[in-house]
Image: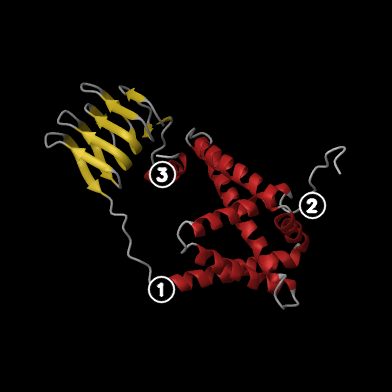
Amino acid sequence: MSLAETLPLLVVVLLVLAGSGVDPSSMEIVFDGERTVETTPDAYVVAGGTVTVPENATVRGQVFVVGGDTRIAGRVSGDVRLFAGNLSVPETGTVTGELQTVAGTLSVAPGADIGRQTTLDVDTQPRSPLATVGFLAMQMVLLGGVAALLVRRVPGLFATVGDAVTHHPVVSGVVGSIAGTTMLVLFVYMAFTLVLLPLSIVGLVAEFLLVLYGYLVYGYLVGQRLPVERVDIATGFGVAGVLLGVDLLGRVPYLGTAMQFLLVVVGLGAVLITYLGVRRFEPPQIPGAT
């Protein structure tokens, strides 16, 4: 499993821990290699590799399987949750708490001692076309209104970021892709230190808001090309058009996803290199270059 596939599952693990009311003091995550586990911290996450709880061994705490292969031949005094990967419990295995399957492959021998075994059905009913259109329209109105208000109050910010998007898209894209990936990985890893969990949540929210800021700037740029005199109203319509375009792109396999990713990284990079629009980006001049 790639890092891009693992990170969302790790975020899910954090949300499960937060929602369970349990306050673990330590956590360990395994990405690769072969491990024989006889003691664990309060929360143990298998994201890759091969992990085995041997016979006659007793581990305490919550075990999360989001990748790799896990074999519980001994005793786990706690809950075990399978989100992805492979989990097997032979006849000698014991799980005193809940063994919950969300996804992945589970194999439980008939003689295994399981406190409670459940399967979480994550399949949802398809959203009706009317609900889909309504949700998109709500986004258009809400974000269009926010963009119009911001342009009216601080018009220079959007203009500065928009200049970076239009005149320096390559630099913006490179900075956005590197910074966005680095921040996402950093904040998720910070969350697994537990002590820094509140800070990591704030960081993830901040990164999301920066990406959203980039989309609002795209709306501003589109609004500049509309036959509307008032900049704020034009920006509101522009944001609505951008959201509609992004939604349509999402329906195009592969190419649409690639275009969405490109929009995200260029917008994020433009926001960062202009210091949120406070300073106009000027590429460095190489001495002696003409």
Gap between marks 1 and 2 measured at Cα? 43 Å
Q: Residues within 10 Å of mark 2 (few under 14, many from 20)?
A: some
The residues tagged by marks 1 and 3 sit, at their Cα atoms, a distance apart of: 29 Å
Which residue is disc 3 drawn over? 9
Quick one: which residue is furthest to the front in this view? 290
Name the amino acid type tagged 1: Pro
The numbered mark at residue 29 is none
For the residues marked 3 and 2, what is the alpha-carbon distance in whole angstroms?
38 Å
Q: Is residue 61 above or below residue 103?
A: above
**136 relative to 51, above or below:** below
Marks 1 & 3, CB-CB < 8 Å contact? no
Tag count: 3
Which structural element holds mark 1?
helix
Dot 3: few (<14), some (14–19), or many (≥20) neighbours within 10 Å? some
- Find residue 277 and report its image quarter: bottom right
Residue pointed to by mark 1: 129
* Residue annotated with mark 2: 280
Q: Is residue 58 left or right of residue 35?
A: left
Query: Residue placed at 26% from the left, 42% from the top?
Result: 105
